[in-house]
């Protein structure tokens, strides 16, 4: 089976596992948030890995950087939503701070490195 280049990226792998754990976390949110907070949090989490994959498939560095920026924005959206979810007591603030925030920070750092690499001029 062929492995695509984005699948080899540590940042994509980390974002993928983060999305999986977000799905598990949101299972405990109130049922009346099914089409609100649950949907929004899950969509932001999925968007991170999806945009990394899409950026990795682009031919130009500018296009790659564009999608890595979108992935970063989705990651920040996810963090904001998790903070609000803790404020609403849908999940424990301690869980967000201990389990999710460090992982979001790691993905953020990896994404920034990937974006910066995409912006670097090619040496001849």
Image: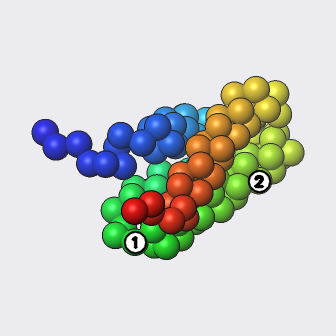
Q: CA distance from mark 2 to mark 1?
A: 31 Å
Residue at 49% from the left image edge and 73% from the top image edge: 62
Please give the count of numbered marks on the rendered protein.
2
- In the depicted view, which residue is nearer to us: 118 or 30? 118
Quadrant location of the C terminus in the rendered image: bottom left
Residue 88 shown left or right of residue 58 in the figure: right
Residue at 53% from the left image edge and 55% from the top image edge: 117
Badge 1 element: loop
The percent position of residue 115, horizontal first and vertical second, equals: 56, 58
Relative vertical location of residue 48 with respect to residue 3 in this rendering, above or below: below
- Mark 1 — residue? 60
Badge 2 element: helix
- In the depicted view, which residue is nearer to us: 40 or 96? 96
In terms of image quadrants, where is residue 92? Answer: top right
Residue 57 shown left or right of residue 55 in the figure: left
The answer to the question of whether label 2 and label 1 lie on touching residues, with beta carbons closer than 8 A, is no
Q: Residue furthest right?
A: 87
Q: In the drawing, what numbered circle is on residue 80?
A: 2
- In the depicted view, which residue is nearer to us: 123 or 55? 123
Residue at 16% from the left image edge and 43% from the top image edge: 2
């Amino acid at each position: 089976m062929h492995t695509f280049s984005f699948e080899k990226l540590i940042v994509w792998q980390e974002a993928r596992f983060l999305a999986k754990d977000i799905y598990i976390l949101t299972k405990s949110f109130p049922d009346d948030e099914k089409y609100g907070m649950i949907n929004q949090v899950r969509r932001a989490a999925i968007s991170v890995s999806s945009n990394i994959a899409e950026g990795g498939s682009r031919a130009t560095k500018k296009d790659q950087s564009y999608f890595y920026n979108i992935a970063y924005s989705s990651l920040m959206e996810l963090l904001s939503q998790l903070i609000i979810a803790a404020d609403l007591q849908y999940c424990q603030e301690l869980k967000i701070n201990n389990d999710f925030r460090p992982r979001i920070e790691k993905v953020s750092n990896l994404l920034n490195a990937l974006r910066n690499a995409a912006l670097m001029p090619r040496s001849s």
